[in-house]
Amino acid sequence: IKTERPALRVQRFYGKPSVITYETNELTAVCPMTGLPDYYTLRIIYVPDKYIPELKSLKYYLLWYRDKPVFHEHLATMILEDFIKYVKPTRAIVELDVNIRGGIKTKVRVAWCIKNSYYHVLKYLDEGLV
């Protein structure tokens, strides 16, 4: 059984500077405390540099998590780190909206930019990408 997260395949980006958003409600993982499935709406908002992900590859990458026990805060960070590693955007935000569990609505938002200073991360969390 393959336990490593799959790589994202990328394509060359030839467009002008853009803000691109991918959104899906098909992301699932397993709660490490209860073993029950968690359901998410995922948004990846980014500014590409030289690459964009192949969407089929992104879909299979996200499917890999369906039976993995992971806390949502860690899941958002793992997705962001892999997105940065393979796509190499200039800026990126990963947002997870977690379906209500135990009567509590949870949203997780992690951000990164090429300057990656604390100030810039706070700026993009407060204001979005642009």
Image (cartoon, rainbow, N blue to C red):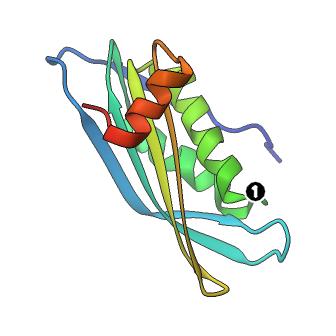
Q: Residues within 10 Å of mark 1 (few under 14, many from 20)?
A: some
Front residue of 82 and 103:
103
8 lies above or below 65: above
| Left or right of residue 24, residue 122 in this image | right
Q: Is residue 43 above or below residue 119?
A: below
Let me know if residue 89 appears in the view: yes
Furthest residue in direction bottom, as rendered: 103
Identify the residue shown where x is 14% and y is 17%.
16
- Horizontal and vertical percent for residue 32? 83, 65
Q: To which residue does mark 1 refer?
A: 70
Viewer-proximal residue among 100 and 11 = 100
Residue 112 makes an appearance in the image: no
Question: Residue 126 at what x, y percent from top left?
Answer: 38, 41
Q: Residue at x 64, y 36 (%)?
A: 6
Residue 115: x and y in percent read 47, 12
Residue 10 appears at what percent x and percent y?
42, 24
Q: Amino acid at mark 1?
A: Val
